[in-house]
Amino acid sequence: MKRKKGYFSISAVAKMFSVHQQTIRLYEKEGLINPKRSSGNTRLFSEEDVDRLEEVIYLTHKLGINLAGVEMILKLQKQIKKMQTDMNALFKKLQKELSDESEMHKQIIKEAANKISEVKKRKKVALSPENVLKNLE
Amino acid sequence: MKRKKGYFSISAVAKMFSVHQQTIRLYEKEGLINPKRSSGNTRLFSEEDVDRLEEVIYLTHKLGINLAGVEMILKLQKQIKKMQTDMNALFKKLQKELSDESEMHKQIIKEAANKISEVKKRKKVALSPENVLKNLE
């Protein structure tokens, strides 16, 4: 059923979902789907258009929701999808910040420990018999 | 228009939105609103029931959405509200974790600085002429 360049024709899509081409044209007129057109003005349905059409058909034919309802539902579903994407991005960002902060924190502890042991070592050297004598010269 | 204990009667609510009581009863039958009942079986509309009814009337009367659509829209709106609440809670929690981590980090730097200056001070005391002589005794 596939047409060149991975697009589907309106007749292929109508067969796919057992609906009239007129129904699909109505959904397009109502702005629920928006397939692009070929240079010869033929509708070209991408995979995404087909998925969206499938959702519209499910809402209208299976759930009995009218087109005004479908329009709002598609908007709300888009909003939910965006919120989920934003939430994931925010979560990842904050996780990275926490892990960076924790890494910096470990580094500071390590540096402080090194500094303390270095100062202690220098103190030992300074107090060695040779140095004590040198201090008296 | 208010009735005892902050509830509204069906007639008050019908007047409030200029709809028939029958319309409100239909919405209740379809499960879109669920006002509780008094001991005498009278419908009692809380502020929340009134808000929900207002939303149902807006979707049906203003946007022309049918009841099947309204049902799904209310569910999606509830989901969006829950996601917003969850997102805020997550955001606050992670902000607190970041600020706690940062506080701990400052505390460690402070303690390390104190420790280093304390060790340096002890080294100075150890190298004072009195102590150097004592070391030789």
Image (cartoon, coloured by chain):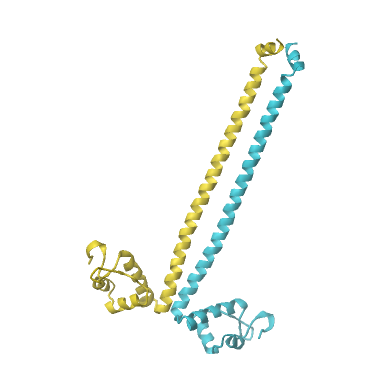
Chain colours: A yellow, B cyan
| Observer able to see residue B80 | yes
Quadrant occupied by the N terminus of chain B: bottom right
Residue at (75% x, 16% y) in the render = B129
Quadrant occupied by the C terminus of chain B: top right
Q: Which residue is outermost to the right?
A: B130
Q: Is residue A57 left or right of residue B23?
A: left
Across and down, in percent, residue A9 comes to 25, 70
Residue at (57% x, 59% y) in the render = B89
Q: Quadrant of residue A119?
A: top right
Q: Which residue is outermost to the front?
A: A39
| Observer able to see residue A65 | no
Q: Quadrant of residue A37?
A: bottom left
Quick check: B109 above or below B99? above
Residue at (66% x, 30% y) in the render = B116
Across and down, in percent, residue A62 comes to 37, 76
Across and down, in percent, residue B39 comes to 64, 83
Across and down, in percent, residue B113 comes to 66, 34
